Image (cartoon, helix red, strand yellow):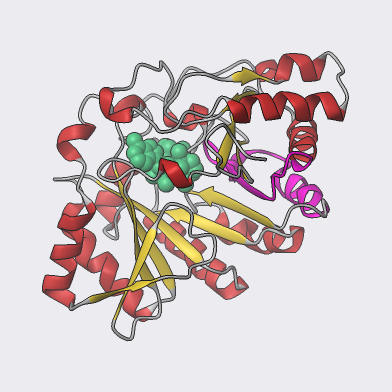
Amino acid sequence: MLDGYKRDISYLRVSVTDRCNFRCVYCMPADGVKTIEHKEILTLEEIFQIIKAATKIGIRKVRLTGGEPLVRLGIVDLINRINNLPEIDDIAITTNGILLQEMGTDLKKAGLNRVNISLDSLNHKRFHNITRNGDLKRVMQGIEEALRLGFHPIKINTVVVRGVNSDEVVEFARWTKEVPVHVRFIELMPIGTSSPWAEDRYVPEEEIKDIITDRLGSLTEIKKMKGSGPARYYKLDNALGSIGFITAMSNHFCSKCNRLRLTATGGLRPCLFDKREVDIKTPLRSGINEDVIAKIISEAVLLKPDRHHMNYGWDDQRVMSQIGG
Ligand code: SAM
Ligand code: SF4
């Protein structure tokens, strides 16, 4: 359906859990976030009911995220059920990749189409420091498994933080020459734990492009990329993969935003950077039918603001993993 600014909202991002097995420095505090009571978290059945009702208002693409979606028990079965909804034509996940090697085959069989894997460093020690406990070797094995299983395209999310991993952009770019991965450099956003320091640490697209072209030659823009969303993509000469930029800070893409978010606790969130949420859990638990669920979803769509105002600061108490990145 169209929102109040004539954008066609067809994409639902679902946070299936607020929990995570990493503690990335820009996303979560070192000792994690306060655990939410189990009963406050949507059950997988409830998530499915909401997705099914959302197809009635035109949702065609679903992305499962979190927290870390692969730690949610029953995730494979949920994907299988979503895959059986005829209206849904694309199911994707965003994952830190640590469980991908062992779960890849089941995810593929269940009908998952695409994976985005977050990876902020190609250096073992640094990766461990950024994630506070991640094992780069296992994530790389997960990426290899995803390639082997034929997930396509495989996108790598790399949040560039000045003074932390900004010296690795050339190495990431070089990787796309040899391996068919699509590395997206993401501008650090002032959300949750990173909000006090993000403004000084985010690295704009133009700066990264200059560094890469200086060292590796020209970048040619690619017009067509499956599920390209807000990213702009480029290719180095003869590269198997590509390089993308997600520039929420330096060049927002709100006029093309087609997404609605569902938080792990059952809030429909029209914009990541807007605190307003429509509670769908309470009415759902009171036993409303699918048409009423769809009506509540359409009300949330109509609350979508014309653009985000993130540059003015983050006054939400919650962090990214609780809302769904
Ligand atoms: N755990 C999964 C993962 O890491 O891919 C999914 C959830 S995570 C919140 C989704 C994405 O949000 C990741 O690519 C992560 O790097 C990104 N992210 C988290 N905090 C961010 C921030 N402050 N600025 C930019 N991206 C951020
Ligand atoms: Fe976990 Fe993803 Fe946040 Fe890292 S970015 S702490 S992997 S939810």
Residue 9 lies, with reference to residue 99, above or below; the image says: above
Whether residue 264 can be seen here: no
Give how far across and how far down residue 149 sits, in percent.
Answer: 62, 72
Residue drawn where x is 33% and y is 22% of the image: 314
Label tally? 0
Q: Nearer the viewer, residue 28 or 199?
A: 199
Judged from this view, the residue extending furthest toward the bottom is 238
Depth check: 260 or 62 in front?
A: 260
Image point 47% across, 70% down: which residue?
224
Q: Is residue 46 magenta?
A: no
Q: Position of residue 191 (x, y in %)?
A: 35, 29
Q: Which residues are magenta?
A: 55-84
Q: Quadrant of residue 193?
A: top left
Q: Quadrant of residue 234?
A: bottom left
Q: What residue sits 47% from the left and 19% below the top?
A: 275
Residue at image location 14% in from the left, 64% down from the top = 210
